[in-house]
Image (cartoon, rainbow, N blue to C red):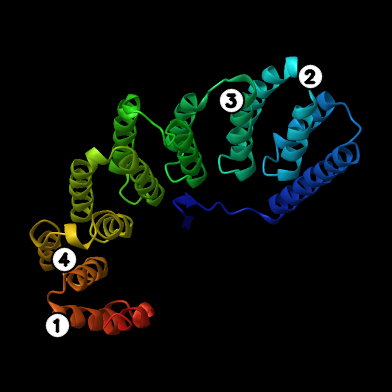
Amino acid sequence: MSVHGQVKVRTSAEQKAARERERAEKLRLYLSEYENILTNRQTADPLVLLKSTENVLSEHPDCFTLWNVRREALLKIDHEQEKDFLEKELSVTQRCLQSNPKSYSCWYQRQWCLKQLREKFNVNLYKNELGLCKKYLELDERNFHCWAYRYYLLEQLCPPTSSTDLEPFYDQELEFLHATIGRNLSNYSAWHYRSKYLDKLLDQSPARRSAVLSLEWELVLNAVYTDCWDQAAWFYLRWLLFKQLGSDAISEDKHIKPLEELDEVEPRNRWCMLALCQLWKEKKIRDEKRKCYLVQLANEIDCDRAQFYRDQI
């Protein structure tokens, strides 16, 4: 039996008992160290707190309280040393991410360190962090914590007053996203990040709007034709049509006809049928066929969401 592609290994009763004893001992040590840190939180030397919390967090990086303790300790360090310790903290978080790449607390600690370095010492490391994101997304392309962190970096690198100097950055990011989605069309996180990124790109470069949206339509149309049963691209397709293009810009020849042709090739595909129903309604065309499709979806194809379809008839 496999779960998410990983084979489940059977263990004997002795192995299970030994594992439970080991886990119980680790928990005992963790709780002992945790209580000791909290007891001495206000009185201990900041360097001592940094050392003791690092020991615990290297094994348990999700403990948000201990990251709070570290932030308090870092703020108590002499200003002359603070910059060096903040840069060291980035190394600490990177080691902890190796233990758990999906730790909310750890990713947040990196954000906090970067902000402190920029505001107090005018050290801007945001662009360097893109390389770290690329590394972790190569290890797990669906790590939404890393995608969220990458979007945070994007906000810092592309402020509202961005100039044309950032145009090369925009193009590099689009290329990165294209490659990521090309490796896996089912990557919801990559599609979602792409939508967030395009929102920002189009706000800051309105002159590129027409050309960019045209290329996006070609990309997502190719994706649904490649695998029309994968829902990730369909979510992006509907976002692109209804949130970016809008009713007036939707073309029957360019946007509706290709999906009608796909519907003929792959009949009873609920994602294609739903997209067409929404498009027909938006453009006030093929109303009888739209109602017929919604009835089919409710009664035959996707009965679990029957009421959702009936509400649209």
Mark 4 or 3: the one toward you: 3
Residue at the extreme left of the image, as rendered: 253
Residue 94 seen in render: no
Amino acid carrying mark 4 in the image:
Glu
> Do the CB atoms of the residues marked 3 and 1 lie less than 8 Å apart?
no
Whether residue 273 is situated above or below residue 164 in the rendered picture: below
For the residues marked 1 and 4, what is the alpha-carbon distance in whole angstroms? 20 Å
The residue that label 1 is drawn on is 288
> Do the CB atoms of the residues marked 2 and 1 lie less than 8 Å apart?
no
The residue that label 4 is drawn on is 266
Residue 272 disc label: none
For the residues marked 2 and 1, what is the alpha-carbon distance in whole angstroms? 74 Å
User: Regarding mark 2 in the picture, which secondary structure is present there?
Assistant: loop
Q: Earlier in the sequence, mark 2 or mark 1?
A: 2
Residue 63 located left or right of residue 185? right
> Do the CB atoms of the residues marked 3 and 2 lie less than 8 Å apart?
no
The residue that label 3 is drawn on is 118
Pick whichever, 7 or 207, lies toward us. Answer: 207
User: Regarding mark 3 in the picture, which secondary structure is present there?
Assistant: helix
Amino acid carrying mark 1 in the image:
Glu
Residue 299: give x, y in percent of width and height: 28, 85
> Do the CB atoms of the residues marked 4 and 3 lie less than 8 Å apart?
no
Residue at the extreme top of the image, as rendered: 80
Q: Earlier in the sequence, mark 4 or mark 3?
A: 3
Amino acid carrying mark 2 in the image:
Asp
Q: Earlier in the sequence, mark 3 or mark 2?
A: 2
User: Regarding mark 1 in the picture, which secondary structure is present there?
Assistant: helix
